[in-house]
Image (spheres, rainbow, N blue to C red):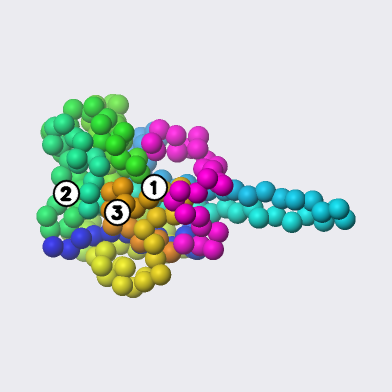
Amino acid sequence: MTQYGFYFDSTRCTGCRTCEMACKDIKDLPASIAFRTVYDYEGGTFTVAEDGTCSTDAYAYHVSVSCNQCNEPACLAICPQEAISKDAETGIVTSDPAKCIGCGSCTTACPYGAPKVNEDLGKSVKCDACSARVAEGKNPICVDACPLRALEFGDIEELRAAHADGVAAIAPLPAADMTDPNLVILACPAAKEPDDETGFVANELEVEGSVD
């Protein structure tokens, strides 16, 4: 078995959302649904000295995330219809529309907000890592679309070996021990730990409804 996963370089990401838009285009998603989400995470403040000079510890960075094809998918564990499965050969997590009843349990359970309920279809839909493209030897569209080459896709063990300084989570993502995601992140200097409380998601309205 080859367990596929993603690598994300937060030192390169500019938050342009090309990955998100390319995914929406190829999957023909409605405006209210995105399989890949870009978070703008910001924090810090400034102080004014007696002489009027200012100093600051402000920071801002971006995090692009989709379904992480987790080893312990919360969506799979909670689905009452057994509509979600993890492929034995690739480790890619998919949802079967023939079994799905659109109850939204998977959306509530996933700490990454990966599955979405398409109200028009009455079904749960999610990133499948562009499995059809992968079967043809191609990358998921988000990877090829990124103009800064901040995303990579492949055998997760090879990605971890190639990026030995990578971590599995940075704020605002949840701690990796929740679902054991197949994700490697190169943290930028400003990146905070997953349990950070000093910052906030600055584009919350944009991602609202797509995250828990």
> Which residue corresponds to mark 3?
181
Residue beneath label 1, please? 174
The magenta stretch is 187-212
Is residue 152 left or right of 147 when viewed as pictured?
Answer: left
Give the residue displayed 34% in from the left and 42% down from the top: 111
Residue 18 visible in image = no
- Tell me residue 191's x, y (percent): 51, 57
Secondary structure of the residue carrying tag 1 is: loop
- Please indicate whether residue 120 sits to the left or right of residue 58 in the image: left
Give yes or no for contact between labels 3 and 1 (Cβ–Cβ under 8 Å). Answer: no
Q: Is residue 53 left or right of residue 102?
A: right
Q: Position of residue 64 (x, y in %)?
A: 42, 52
Q: Quadrant of the N terminus?
A: bottom left
Looking at the rendered structure, the secondary structure element under dot 3 is loop
Q: Residue at x 28, y 46 (%)?
A: 127
Report the mark closest to the observer, 3 or 2: 3
Q: Earlier in the sequence, mark 3 or mark 1?
A: 1
**Residues at circles 3 and 2 in contact by the CB criterion of under 8 Å:** no
- Residue at 11%, 55% in the rendered image: 88
Crowd around label 1: few <14 · some 14–19 · many ≥20 (10 Å)? some
> Which numbered marker is on residue 197?
none
| Residue 86 marker | 2
Which amino acid, mark 2?
Answer: Lys
- Nearer-N-terminus badge (1/2): 2
